[in-house]
Image (cartoon, helix red, strand yellow):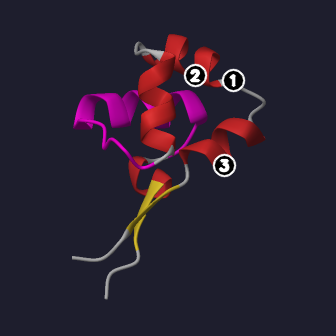
Amino acid sequence: MGEIICKVKYYRTFEGLSQRELASLSGTAASTICEIESGKRIPNVLLAVRIARVLGKQVDELWEDIGY
């Protein structure tokens, strides 16, 4: 399995949102957003969809498999 690249932080900062704001809009805790952005946590499908909607993206735009 390849490495998964998380682009949530990139799109969050592009949209001018703090972790706390993204968390609030997507129905989770700011600490969860922090863990997702740092690669310590992979969100479940529902949360991934919520984050994508807030950022105006598709889920597959936020996580990229750079497989080997």
Identify the disc placed on residue 10.
Answer: 3
Element class at badge 2: helix
Tell me if residue 62 comes above or below residue 48 in the rendering. below
Three-letter code, disc 2: Leu
Mark 2, residue position: 22
Is there CB contact under 8 Å for labels 2 and 1?
A: yes
* Residue 20 picture quarter: top right
Name the residue at 76% across, 42% down: 14
Three-letter code, disc 1: Ser
Identify the disc placed on residue 51.
Answer: none
Residue 2 on the magenta segment: no
* Badge 2 or badge 3: first in the primary sequence: 3
Q: Is residue 61 left or right of residue 55?
A: left
* Residue 11 picture quarter: top right
Highlighted magenta segment, given as a residue range:
39-57
Q: Nearer the viewer, residue 52 or 41?
A: 41
Tell me if residue 17 comes above or below residue 42 in the rendering. above
Is there CB contact under 8 Å for labels 3 and 1?
A: no
Mark 1, residue position: 18
Name the residue at 46% across, 22% down: 31
Element class at badge 1: loop
Q: Is residue 24 left or right of residue 66?
A: right
Give the Cα separation between the discs numbered 2 and 3.
12 Å
Q: Position of residue 54 (x, y in %)?
A: 54, 27
* Badge 3 or badge 1: first in the primary sequence: 3
Quadrant of image for the C terminus: bottom left
Element class at badge 3: helix
